[in-house]
Image (tube, rainbow, N blue to C red):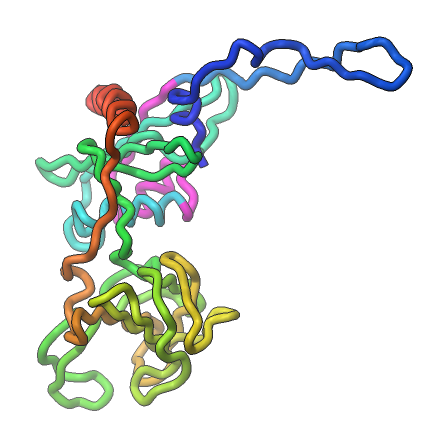
Amino acid sequence: MCNSLNRAHAPSSSKEDAPAVSLKQGASPALAPPAPKPPELARAAESATVDQTFSQAAQSLGMDQGTIATLTDAFAGKVDLHRDLRKGDTLSVIYDRPQGGAAAHDEPLAVRLTTGSSSHDVFLYRDPQGEARYYSKDGKSTRPAFSRYPVAFTRVSSDFSLRRLDPVTHRWQSHDGVDLAAPIGTPVHATAQGKVKFVGRQTGYGKVIMLENPPPYSTVYAHLSRFAKGVRKGGTVERGQVIGYVGETGWATGPHLHYEVHVDDVAMDPLTVDLPGDDRLRGEERQRFAKEAESLSAALSG
C-alpha cells in the first residue's frame, strides 16, 4: 500500500532520529548502528493517452493489476470504462517518487480520468488504522460495498436483454445478465459479501455459483471452468474474493463469464443497476483529506 499519505498525516516524533542503545549483560552501553533514513520523496505527475482500454493506459503508467482493479472499482460509479472511453481520452496520475532513484510504482496519490470534456478525480487517503482507499473530492468513498464488475474482461460479448435470439437454442428469450468475454482461467471475484446459495452444475449455466448478497441483492456467476478452493454451499464469501475461474461450460459459444444481478429476485442489467455505496469521511479526517485533495487536485491541473 502507498504510505505517502500516511507520512503526510502521521504526527512527527522527536525520538525518530535518536540513536538506539544496545545493552549486553556485563557490558557498557553501546550505540547500535543508526537505521538508514528513508529516501526523500518528490511529487511527480504523469499522464497517458487511452489508445484501447483503461487497463492498457494504466499499465503504461506502471500500475500493477491489483491497482488497476482498485481504480476500475473507484471509477465504476463515475464512468463506464468499457463503453464511455474513447481513443484520445487521458489518464493522469500523481505519485510520490524517491529522489534520484528508480521510480517506485506504488498506488498513485491521485488519478484523473478525462473523457471528452468531463474529468473524474479520485484521491488516496489512509485512515488512522492504516487502511488506504480512494475517495472523491467530496470525501465519499469510491470503494462500493458492491463492485460493478466481477472479472477483468476484454469486452461485453452479449448485453442484458428482455428479449434476444439465444445463439444456442435459437429461441427468443430473455438474457438475464451480461456476458463478459475473458480468457479461460481468468479469476472471477464475488462482487459483494454473500452466502453461497448454490455451487455446482445446472443446465445452460454449466458450472455456476449463486450468492445471496446483502438484501435485496443476489448474484449469479456462470459458465465457470472450475470453482475456487473452499467455495461450498452455505459458506460465506467476501467482496473481491476469488470464487471461480472463467470457462465455457454449459450453453456457451466461447469463453466468458455470464453474470447476473437480481434485486428482490428480479433480474436487472448488471452494467446499470444502482448499487449500494459506502461511507463518507467525517470530522477531522474529512478536514485532513480535504486539504490534501485540494493540493493534489491543483497538481493534476498542472
* Image location (x, y in percent) of residue 3: 45, 29
Asked whether residue 57 appears in the rendered view, the answer is yes
Q: How many marks?
A: 0
Of residue 75 and residue 99, the one placed in the foreground of this image is 75
Of residue 89 and residue 265, the one placed in the foreground of this image is 265
* Image location (x, y in percent) of residue 273: 15, 61
Q: Is residue 159 left or right of residue 8?
A: left
Image height check: is 209 above or below 79? below
On the rendered image, what quadrant is the N terminus found in?
A: top left
Of residue 117 and residue 191, the one placed in the foreground of this image is 191
Instruction: Kindly identify the residue that appears in the image at 38 percent across and 26 percent down.
Output: 5
In reply to whether residue 21 is colored magenta, the answer given is no
Image height check: is 160 above or below 164? above
* Image location (x, y in percent) of residue 30: 80, 10
Instruction: Kindly identify the residue that appears in the image at 52 percent across and 20 percent down.
Output: 101
In reply to whether residue 44 is colored magenta, the answer given is yes
Asked whether residue 90 appears in the rendered view, the answer is no
Locate residue 44: give its quadrant: top left
Of residue 61 and residue 106, the one placed in the foreground of this image is 106
Locate residue 238: give its quadrant: bottom left
Q: Is residue 27 left or right of residue 213?
A: right
Image: magenta residue range: 43-66
Instruction: Kindly identify the residue that appears in the image at 17 percent across and 69 percent down.
Output: 263
On the rendered image, what quadrant is the C terminus found in?
A: top left
Instruction: Kindly identify the residue that appears in the image at 85 percent across and 18 percent down.
Output: 24
* Image location (x, y in percent) of residue 229: 52, 70
